[in-house]
């Protein structure tokens, strides 16, 4: 026990994943393990509120591609295209408005920091490109009211807003620090005239108590529940959920996730 206590949290995380994930993933675990231990590869979520035509052109010139459009086209075989020439998501507004550029597979180039346009809005937001997929799955439609229950630090919230199709967005997170980051994200990417409470509301409420708010109705709800943040747990000892003093927090995480989802 004393030896275990002296191990860095990142080492404890790797030992845990080797034990648990190998059981579930089997032969796939070595490749997943290598991915988790590799540097994170980001996507650039384009900000449709900013003037970014020149930025998009520069990204394409550097070899980047919009993976969302490519994936939509990849679902069309020659037989399917004759029978059904639609992208995999039926809402055309989502396909046209959300753009996320990535470097090609095997290219570990880094994106430059986003620069503000003439109105002071940043041109793109760097995030794990997979974070865009739940937003596409939401299939946000015009006049929808959307709840992002665990919104901080704001990547998925910003992606939802890129559809420019919703009537109202409520972004919530229990963590005060994450709410602060969320608010800074909105200030950096969304025009001031859209950041009023009848369009976007930001709160710091306990998501487990949301079911008691009977008078609120939403067309779509996104719940990105707290997790073990596996790559962070393997790469950083700071704020690591595998630290010894956070053992109880980690053990109760599945219950918290369930309560948020229910």
Image (cartoon, helix red, strand yellow):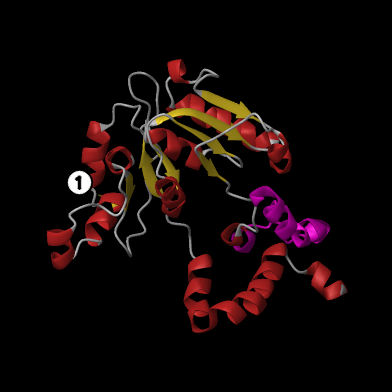
Q: Viewed as shown, does residue 252 lie left or right of 64?
A: right
Outermost residue on the bottom side: it is: 27
Outermost residue on the right side: it is: 2
Q: Viewed as shown, does residue 77 lie left or right of 46?
A: left
Where does label 1 land, which residue? 61
Quadrant of the snapshot with the N terminus? bottom right
x%, y% of residue 26?
A: 54, 83
- Above or below, 37 against 154 in this view is below
Please name whichever residue, 98 or 106, is drawn nearer the observer in this view of the structure. 98
Q: Is mark 1 on a helix, strand or loop?
A: helix
Instruction: Based on the picture, tell me whether residue 244 belongs to the magenta stretch.
Output: yes
Outermost residue on the front side: it is: 214
- Disc 1 residue crowd, few under 14, some 14–19, many 20+, Cα 10 Å: few
Q: Is residue 91 in view?
A: yes
Please tell me which residue is depicted at 73% across the width and 36% down the height of the picture: 212
Please tell me which residue is depicted at 56% across the width and 31% down the height of the picture: 170
Question: Quadrant of the rendered structure where residue 116 is?
Answer: top left
x%, y% of residue 225?
A: 62, 50
| Start-end of magenta stretch | 233-262
Q: Is residue 37 in view?
A: no
Q: Viewed as shown, does residue 245 lie left or right of 199?
A: right
x%, y% of residue 206?
A: 72, 38
Magenta stretch: helix, strand or loop mostly: helix
- Above or below, 139 against 16 in this view is above
Please name whichever residue, 25 or 53, is drawn nearer the observer in this view of the structure. 25
Instruction: Based on the picture, tell me whether residue 122 belongs to the magenta stretch.
Output: no
């Amino acid at each position: 026990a004393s030896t275990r206590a002296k191990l860095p949290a990142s080492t404890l995380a790797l030992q845990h994943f080797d034990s648990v994930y190998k059981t579930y993933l089997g032969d796939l675990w070595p490749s997943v393990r290598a991915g988790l231990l590799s540097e994170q590869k980001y996507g650039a979520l384009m900000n449709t509120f900013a003037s970014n035509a020149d930025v998009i052109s520069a990204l394409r010139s550097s070899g980047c591609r919009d993976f969302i459009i490519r994936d939509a086209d990849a679902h069309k075989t020659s037989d399917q295209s004759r029978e059904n020439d639609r992208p995999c998501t039926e809402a055309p507004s989502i396909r046209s408005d959300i753009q996320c550029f990535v470097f090609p597979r095997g290219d570990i180039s880094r994106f430059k920091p986003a620069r503000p346009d003439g109105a002071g809005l940043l041109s793109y937001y760097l995030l794990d490109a997979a974070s865009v997929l739940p937003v596409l799955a939401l299939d946000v439609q015009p006049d929808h009211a959307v709840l992002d229950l665990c919104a901080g630090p704001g990547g998925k919230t910003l992606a939802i807003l890129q559809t420019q199709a919703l009537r109202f967005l409520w972004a919530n997170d229990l963590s005060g620090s994450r709410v602060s980051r969320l608010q800074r994200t909105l200030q950096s990417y969304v025009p001031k005239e859209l950041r009023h409470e009848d369009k976007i509301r930001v709160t710091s409420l306990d998501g487990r108590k949301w079911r008691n708010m009977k008078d609120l109705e939403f067309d779509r709800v996104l719940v990105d529940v707290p997790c073990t943040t596996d790559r962070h747990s393997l790469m950083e000892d700071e704020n690591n959920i595998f630290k010894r003093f956070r053992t109880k927090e980690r053990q109760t995480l599945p219950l918290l996730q369930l309560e948020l989802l229910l």
